[in-house]
Amino acid sequence: MHFLDQAKIYLKSGAGGPGAVSFRREKYVEYGGPDGGNGGKGGDIIFEAVQGLNTLIDFRYAQHFKAKRGSHGMGRDRYGAGADDLVIKVPVGTQVLSEDKEDVIADFTEVGQRVVMLEGGMGGRGNASFKSSTNRAPRQHQPGEPSEEMWVWLRLKLLADVGLLGLPNAGKSTFINSVSNAKAKVGAYAFTTLVPKLGVVQHKAREFVIADIPGLIEGAADGAGIGDRFLGHIERCRVLIHLVDISGSDPAEAMVTVQHELAAYGADLESKPQLIVLNKTDLADTELVRGFAAELREAGADEVFAISGATGRGISDLLDSVLSYLPDRTSTETNAAEEENLDEAKPWSPI
């Protein structure tokens, strides 16, 4: 499945159906009177956050969403049928922005969250509703309210508990593969990861989601490399794991470079809790690891974890520290608990 985190779409609700002008005409009924029914309501445009989606790729092939209009009223006091609402399903973490991207219209952070984006027009009144003691044969009716339309941008920010970042070739893909069920591509060249990856980590009877984003380089805020467009996917993470390659030219400088790009991006990313991790320690001896760890602390790191994503050394201690930043129940654990309770509340029965 291809990954897409931005899309521009056109929305149009349904117009209301017009009311009818009709008069009752039956044999032996001398004064039938007006019997034109009202028109039906147009369909609403509704967004709904659903589980199981993590991309906006469907909106690359369908950009126009139009709800149906309400049916017109008819004689014999028959009201027009209301049109069905058009429900657009989006991944959890999707934001709906105005056409100029200045305003956030809706933000979907929970499964099942629904927002009526555009309301369908009300149906027009038929001439039967205008009947009165002084107006026995009204011929006026209403055409029904017009539809509403707008262009919006959809922007996806993946919801993960832990964010993974660092320079290219810091070993992020190897790390996420070793701790989760992700199957990220691993290669000995820069920018192996081109789009964000999600993985579910299970550690000490806990479960949480980790997100890996493409590597950052100096000048990413100005568009260098892949740029910083994917940093939005870790804005909502509770803690960030910052991987630093011990085999790089200068690990301390690499850490500072990423910190500067986080500050340049904004959204308070630089103030989020970070776990500085010295990776690929299987390629260095103990003395070299201690020396680089000291340099990282001098450059601003509070604590440095030494691990090897390839061999798994030190990963358990790192994940123990990650758990201290998580709530009592993460989103995946909450969903699992709800499913278990549902099964207990409704035991199986053939009837």
Image (cartoon, helix red, strand yellow):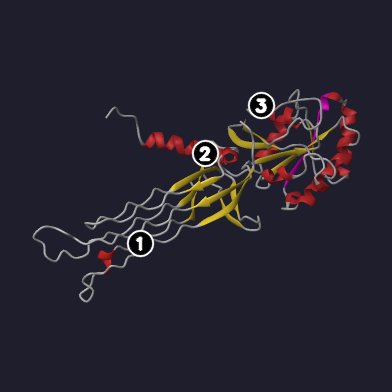
Number of marks in picture: 3
The dominant secondary structure in magenta is: strand
Q: Which residue is at a point 51% across and 47% down the rendered structure image?
A: 65
Pick whichever, 38 or 204, lies toward us: 38
Q: Is residue 279 magenta?
A: yes
- Amino acid type of the residue that numbered disc 3 sits on in the rendered structure: Lys
User: Within 10 Å of the Cα at label 1, are there few (<14), some (14-19), or many (20+) other Cα atoms?
Assistant: many
Residue 332 in view, yes or no: yes
Q: Position of residue 223 (x, y in %)?
A: 80, 45
**Residue identified by numbered label 2:** 51
Please identify the quarter of the rendering in which residue 161 is found: top right
Asked if disc 1 and disc 2 are in contact, CB closer than 8 Å, the reply is no
- Amino acid type of the residue that numbered disc 2 sits on in the rendered structure: Gln
- Compared across the picture, whether 44 is left or right of 257 comes to left
For the residues labelled 2 and 3, the Cα–Cα distance comes to: 20 Å
Residue 203 in view, yes or no: no
User: Within 10 Å of the Cα at label 2, are there few (<14), some (14-19), or many (20+) other Cα atoms?
Assistant: few
Residues in magenta, as a range:
273-282
Pick whichever, 118 or 241, lies toward us: 118
**Residue identified by numbered label 3:** 183
- SS under mark 3: loop
**Residue identified by numbered label 1:** 124
- SS under mark 2: loop
Q: Is residue 339 magenta?
A: no
- Amino acid type of the residue that numbered disc 1 sits on in the rendered structure: Gly
Q: Position of residue 47 (x, y in %)?
A: 50, 48
- Compared across the picture, whether 49 is left or right of 313 comes to left
Residue at the farthest bottom position: 134
Asked if disc 3 and disc 1 are in contact, CB closer than 8 Å, the reply is no
* Tag in front: 3 or 1: 1
Q: Earlier in the sequence, mark 2 or mark 3?
A: 2
Say above or below: 344 vs 155.
Answer: above
